[in-house]
Image (spheres, rainbow, N blue to C red):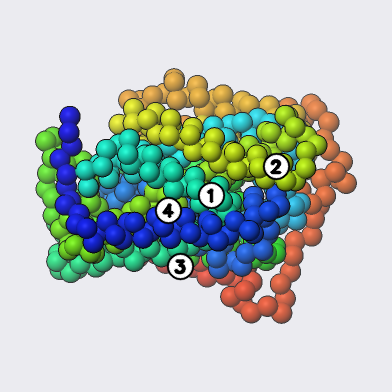
Amino acid sequence: MKQDVLLNAGWIDYVFVLIYFVFVIGIGWMLKSRAKTGEDFFLSGRSIPSWITSLAFLSANLGALEVLGMAANGAEYGWMTTHFYWIGAVPAMLFLGLYMMPFYYVSRVRSVPEYLKYRFNEATRGLNAISFAIMTVLVSGISLYSMALIFQVLVGWSINVSVLVSALVVLIYVGLGGLTSSIYNEVIQFFLIWLGLLLIPILGLHELGGWDAMIQRLPESFGHLWAGLDHPEHNAMGIHWLGVVLGLGFVLSFGYWTTDFLVVQRAFAARDLRSAQLTPIYASLWKMLVPFLVIIPGLIAAVLFHNLGKPGGPSYNLALPLLMERYYPPGMLGLGLTAMLASFMSGMAGNVTAFTTVWTYDIYQAYIKKDASDEHYVKMGRWAVVIGVLISIGTAYLAAGYPSVMDYMQMLFSIFNAPLFATFLMGMFWKRATPWGGFWGLVSGTAGALLLNVALPEHFFTSPQEGNFWRAWWAWVITVAVTVIVSLFTKPKTEEELKGLVYGTTPLPSYQGWKWYQRPGWVAVVATALLVGLNWYFW
């Protein structure tokens, strides 16, 4: 059935989109000469300053689900959606920068699975490499499908055309310039997203008479973070505060931000350890601002469009496009469309570059061709970009089979990231964790997560979100328990073998003499104070 077009874009709007396509491909072409060696192509030569890597770190995550999915969640659940940004991201980002990045960076590993090889064994590395590659192309498909769905509604592009055009652009600029091209494009995309969408919350709040006037026209729980979480029936999301803290704030958050190579890879590209540590910490400051860009529009839409999400009315996923149609004239509409396109492509490109590195180093080099030249692996990396994009096109149609791509995404994280975080936590902070303890813990946790999704489907919980939070928590518990039990009966590595890999075997860096805003610890203190203050103010 043909989809009605919501926005009638004019020629000036398409000019904006065309300029954007040309620009990102041009960056890939210009940076092609800087991607000759494996370290250049996969890790940007570890030469990029922290302010750039921090924006890329955040932009790689600021994809389709962030912009459209969180605006939709804001319209459906209210301000408590902000938990995904604050407690669901910032503590984990600070923990990564302060405590985990020193081990990642000092060990000079090229990927997250490679760290697992040195800390545990080859079997653990192989298991994580395969599971991560699968998850990455599934998530990349979500970005492609989400973009295609929205552009079909916005400007009348078909699903097939939207998927193929965006996939082709990502293929060209990542294939030419590798991670460096992806990072610099992500920085540009970050500013484009803010420039293209910031007017919506400003104009919307002005029309509604400000924050307080808007909240008065919404359900009671919509204006608070924590009030109403004492019982699932007291909030629209149907969750309890304990599920938020344990499932989202601890397991899902730390599992994503500290072990998902999609975002961690950006910190690997930093020019030194201090810059690598500052990458997620600086990014956390920006992360706290994102709800004002994407969730407030959802609240505005919930007030202005009374049939939103109702039978016969527009989907919650159209909250942001409906506001663009309301506020943006021709020309500005093109800027808004370009911002949305940038968000889709940054998410997909981040997944493709992560897939390329893991495939080339942790699967192809490890198990297929071990002793090839560096030039050979760069060529394989470029072919892996093609492979990753083609598979992502297929998984885009797989994502189309799920009623909520946001719930689908959280389900994937509960299966893949929750057990992995438990393995990393035990490996980095418990010297007694053995190679086979790590392997069987990860196997058990991943298998347990799959079984929990089958044995405890959505109807067992008040809401899909509550189910994802609790399944993630129990998958983490299974991984920890099995790791401890197996480790007590198997032989650990020696202190010398663990040097540079485990807390207590490697001295942490000191940055005495640097200005406070250049020291990871002090910047983290500022971020923590801001986080506490925001949670208190919006309680």
Q: Secondary structure at mark 1?
A: helix
Q: Secondary structure at mark 3?
A: helix
Q: Nearer the viewer, mark 1 or mark 3?
A: 1
Q: CA distance from mark 4 to mark 3?
A: 21 Å
Q: CA distance from mark 4 to mark 2?
A: 29 Å
Residue occupied by mark 3? 530
Query: Quick check: can you spot residue 390?
Result: yes
190 above or below 161?
Answer: below
Residue occupied by mark 1? 174
Amino acid residing under circle 2: Tyr
Q: CA distance from mark 1 to mark 2?
A: 15 Å
Q: Nearer the viewer, mark 1 or mark 4?
A: 1
Q: CA distance from mark 2 to mark 3?
A: 44 Å
Q: Residue 44, located in which quarter of the rendered image?
A: bottom right
Percent position (x, y) of residue 229? 33, 46
Sequence order check: which comes first, mark 4 or mark 3? 4
Q: Is residue 11 left or right of residue 352?
A: left
Residue occupied by mark 2? 377
Amino acid residing under circle 1: Val
